[in-house]
Image: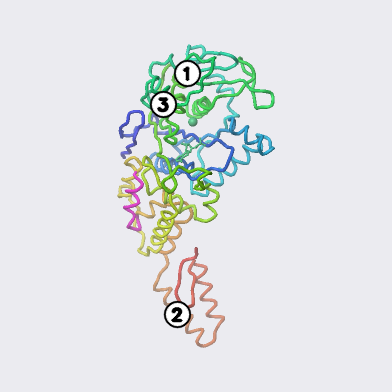
Amino acid sequence: MSLRLFNTLTKTKDEFAPLDPANVRMYVCGPTVYDFAHIGNARPVIVFDVLFRLLRHVYGAGHVTYVRNITDVDDKINARAAERGISIRELTEETARIYEEDVAGLGNLPPSVAPRATEHIPQMLRIIDRLVDAGHAYAADGHVLFDVSSKADYGKLSRRSLDEMIAGSRVEVAPYKKNPMDFVLWKPSEDALPGWDSPWGRGRPGWHIECSAMAGEYLGECFDIHGGGIDLQFPHHENEIAQSEGANHGHPLAKVWMHNGFLQVEGEKMSKSLGNFYTIRDLLADWPGEVLRFNMLRTHYRQPIDFTLAGLRESWKTLERWYEVTEPLADSSPDGEFFAALRDDLNTPAAIASLHQADEMALAGGLGFLGFSNVQLKIAAKTQVDTVAIAAAIEARMAAKATKNFAESDRIRDELLAKGVVLKDGPQGTTWELKK
Ligand code: AMP
Ligand code: ZN
């Protein structure tokens, strides 16, 4: 069954062929845990959750390993913990827990493994050691730096030359660097900050090396898919490639590199100062997670999203209309339009457009595509109830009421309620709806 994915590395949409169909392996860069995640952070989580579910559907649920890390050592974390007067550990544990709740609230499956950076320091040190041995890294002034000039194809993911990189980015100039683009693998840590002993003194890792170490630990030297937001393509993913290939005799890190586009709010970059900053937590207080998820998937993952409250309301209305579907369910066909659209580089807008039939919707629910909550249950319930029988029961209840047999009329109401059917008495008579 064909699955095509756009590969940032080749810039083409290619047929996906796993290295090992019995264990399809995917790594996605996770959050740095110092603050509430915002709705932009939710995008890669939802996009790669759809892919995770699709891969499980195609290769079997037991044949896919999905790793999404937690970055729990970082300068922003150190600064925030100091600001709040709590320990780093307290901050990272609290933020990671909130993150997991938030993304579960958006209907995402937990990844197979959610490794924490601080639990993989020996693996990072091993890679750094190999890079130094191979001549790809050097120690200077308590730091260990990756020597970008040592790798001829450095820049192949973002397709930039070293000169372009230097011109286009805010490089941190430091006297101990041979080349301004050389990046930190390890840096010294003061006593008050987290640190681990190493051959280069007490220190802490750079950000990029964390992902190389955790990906290698759980997925091996080479795996199938590496994902993240487009902002991570350079320098983060470029550097992951350089480190992992440099330490593994040039073997490619991942076959397919996938990047989701950015999310803006009402046409502007989300920022606290503009007052358009939405955390997942705040949104979940006002909107069903399913609506937030569905809204996100109405745009193809590689396109930018303009997130608006009007768009959210629209998405909610659409979902509600779909819940009104009453036709009986047919068998979901994996060859249906919905599934074919997903297999074409996760074309979720086309998949959504195909959702005009109840059977396609059942499949959508199964993939967690529309959501998680109880889309399937709601549709199944609505289609399993016998509308003729409900009408007859309502009539019988009215007759019971007319003879003041309230025990009987209550019994009928409760019997329907037990089947998930809620009766509503109004001026126009009695109507019914499914229990929410
Ligand atoms: P961070 O914690 O900043 O490293 O981000 C975690 C993930 O969210 C990364 O994959 C980022 O690329 C992604 N991300 C951050 N901001 C946005 C945004 N506005 N739109 C889409 N993805 C984003
Ligand atoms: Zn990463």
- Can residue 385 be found in the magenta stretch? no
Reading the image, the residue beneath label 3 is 168
Q: In the rendered structure, which disc, 2 or 3, sits on the residue that comes first in sequence? A: 3
- Pointer 2: what residue? 429
Contact between labelled residues 1 and 2, with CB atoms less than 8 Å apart = no
Of the two numbered discs 2 and 3 in the rendering, the one whose residue sits closer to the viewer: 3
Dot 3 amino acid type: Gly
- On screen, residue 60 versus residue 89, left or right, reads left
The quadrant of the picture occupied by the N terminus is: top left
Mark toward the start of the polypeptide (3 vs 1): 3
- Residue 121 place in picture, x, y as percent: 59, 24
Look at the picture and state if 50 lies above or below 125. below
Q: What stretch is highlighted in magenta?
A: 347-359
Closer to the camera in the image, 102 or 355: 102
Q: Is mark 1 on a helix, strand or loop?
A: loop
Circles 2 and 3 in contact, beta carbons < 8 Å: no
* C-alpha gap between disc 2 and disc 1: 77 Å
Along the line of sight, the residue nearer the viewer: 164 or 27:
164
Which residue position is annotated with label 1?
180
Q: Main secondary structure of the magenta part?
A: helix
Q: Does residue 354 belong to the magenta stretch?
A: yes
